[in-house]
Image (cartoon, rainbow, N blue to C red):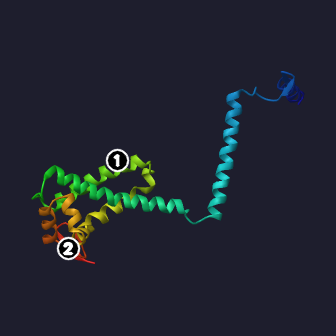
Amino acid sequence: MDHLQDFHARLKRVSKNTQNGDTVVGPALTRAHQRNQRLVEMLSRHEQEGVHRARIEPRMKLTEILSYVLAFAMGGLAAIIARFLRFQLTGDAAQISQDMDLALDIIFAIVVAFILREAVSLSAVKRMGAQFAGILLAIVTMHNVVHTMPDVFSKMFSEDWVTHVTQTTDPGTLYFRGHSYHI
């Protein structure tokens, strides 16, 4: 028993060293150690506030909702730009299979969407689904806009392209892989 008390007494003496006139208990507090302590405290406060916020504010903020709407609109714009780029590269309506046409539209649109997303610094992971939904909706409904505004599209693409789209599709439908589905 005496050995244990002796041991504790020695630990007390050793741990109460003075450093610059201050009594320090335990290891010397370096700048890195103090910084790490502050970071741990900040993270614990942040986690507690996050849990508290989640209980108080279950609804999405308006800015978050608008960012999803923006991502959806950017996806639609990417699909239109992708079709325009494909038209500029291949010329008038290329004679390829409907599956290949859809695949090329989606691939071009994803590349354009990635470039647009980087241009406006939109969070990639959270809003990627909304962007992809915008791409798909624009791809299957773009012919409806061509039916309603053929003059605009004949200036962007060509009159032959507009004629081809209006003859092969029906207005007020979803056009997917060569088949029209009435809305």
Instruction: Tell me what residue is drawn at x 21 percent, y 58 percent.
Output: 156
Position of 29 compared to 120: left or right?
right
Q: Residue at x 30, y 63 (%)?
A: 136
Give the percent coordinates (x, y) of residue 68: 45, 60
Q: CA distance from mark 1 to mark 2?
A: 31 Å
Point out the frontmost of discs 1 and 2.
1
- Which of the two discs, 1 and 2, labels the residue nearer the N terminus? 1
Report the residue that reaches farthest toward the bottom.
182
Which residue is denoted by mark 2 in the rendering? 180
Quarter of the figure with residue 70: bottom left
The quadrant of the picture occupied by the N terminus is: top right
Q: Quadrant of residue 53?
A: bottom right
**Count of numbered badges drawn on the protein:** 2
Which amino acid lies under the numbered mark 1 shown in the image of this protein?
Answer: Ile
Crowding near the residue tagged with mark 1, few <14, some 14–19, many ≥20 C-alpha atoms within 10 Å: few
Dot 1 corresponds to which residue? 115
Circle 1: element type: helix
Residue 153: image location, x then y, percent: 21, 63
Q: Position of residue 61 (x, y in %)?
A: 56, 62
Q: Identify the residue at image location x=42%, y=49%.
A: 120
Asked whether 76 or 29 is in front, the reply is: 76
Residue 147 is left or right of residue 28, and the answer is: left
Where's the C terminus, which quadrant? bottom left
Q: Position of residue 159 (x, y in %)?
A: 14, 63
Asked if residue 112 lies left or right of residue 70, the reply is left
Task: Say what amino acid the circle numbered 2 marks.
Answer: Ser
Name above or below for residue 49 compared with residue 169: above
Left or right, residue 179 beside residue 124: left
Q: Which mark is residue 48?
A: none
